Amino acid sequence: MEDPADNLTDLSVRELNERLASRQPIPGGGSAAALAGAMGASLVAMVAELTIGRPDAADHAAQLVSLRDDALAAQRHLLDLAEQDAAAYAAVVEARRLPRDSDVQRAERGDAMRRTMVAAADVPLRTARAAAQVLELAETIAPIGNPNAVSDAGVASLLGAAAVRGAILNVQINLPYLADDEPLRAQAPGELITLESRTAELESSTAEVVRRRIQPS
C-alpha cells in the first residue's frame, strides 16, 4: 500500500486533491496550508516575472529581481514544509500504534508520543512563519507590479493569509499534547498571536492597494 505521507509534491493536482479528500488522515490541513502558501509565493514570482523589463518598472528593476528570487525561495521552503508536515503526522500515527501491554512498552510509547508531537507542532509553526513572509512579499509587489497582474498579487496575499491561519490552527491543536516543560508549549502561543495580528495587517494593506489599482478613483 502506498504511504500517504510520501511525495506529496510529486502528485498531480488532481491526485493531491483526491488524497486530501480520502479517509486517510495524511496529508491533512497542515500540508494543505503549506501548499497554499507555496502557491501564493509562486504568484508573487509570476507577478515579478511579468513586471521585470517593463519600461514603467525600470526604477524597481533590482527590487523586482529580489522579490522574484525571494518568492521562489519561499515556494521551495513551503513545498518542503508540506512534505515535513505529512511526515510529522505520520510519525504521530505510528507512535499511537505502538504496543502498551507492559510498563516498558507504555514508557517507550509515551516517549515516542512526546517526541513526535513536538515535531507535529513545530512544523506548522515554521509554516506559519514562512507563509507570513509570502504576505510581506505580496504587499511589497502589489503597488509596483504589472498593473495587469495586480489581481494575482491580491490572490497571493489571500493564499498566504490562509496558509498562516491554517498553520496556526495546526499548532494550536497539537500544543495541548506537549509536555508541560516543553519550551514550545510556552513560547508558541505568544508567537501565534503576533503572526495572526501581522497577517491581518498585511492582508488588509495589500487588499487596499489591489482595490485602488483595479478601480482607480
Image (cartoon, grey):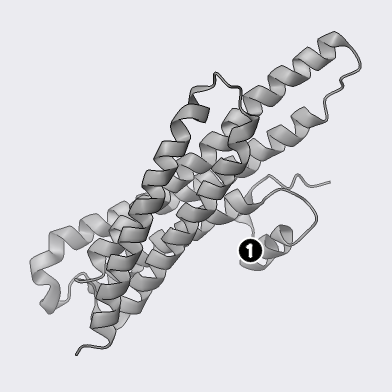
Instruction: Answer above or below: position of 60 versus 108.
Output: below
- Residue 178: quadrant of the picture: top right
Image-based side of 71 in relation to 183, left or right: left
Mark 1 Cα-neighbour bin, 10 Å: few <14, some 14–19, many ≥20: few
Instruction: Measuring from the top left, give residue 207's x and y in whole percent.
Output: 32, 72
- Residue 32: quadrant of the picture: bottom right
Image-based side of 205 in relation to 163, left or right: left
- Say what secondary structure mark 1 lies in: loop
Front-most of residues 127 and 165: 165
Instruction: Measuring from the top left, give residue 14's x and y in whole percent.
Output: 67, 68
Instruction: Answer above or below: position of 94 versus 12.
Output: above
Q: Quadrant of the C terminus?
A: bottom left
Instruction: Measuring from the top left, give residue 116's x and y in whole percent.
Output: 65, 28
Front-most of residues 60 and 217: 217
Q: Which residue is mark 1?
A: 12
Residue, x 59% and y 50% (percent of image)?
Answer: 31
Front-most of residues 70 and 89: 89
Instruction: Measuring from the top left, give residue 177's x and y in whole percent.
Output: 65, 31
Q: Amino acid at mark 1?
A: Ser
Image-based side of 109 in relation to 196, left or right: right
Instruction: Answer above or below: position of 162 versus 182.
Output: below
Residue, x 22% and y 55% (percent of image)?
Answer: 66
Q: Report the residue that reaches farthest toward the right.
A: 101
Residue, x 31% and y 63% (percent of image)?
Answer: 138
Front-most of residues 134 and 73: 134
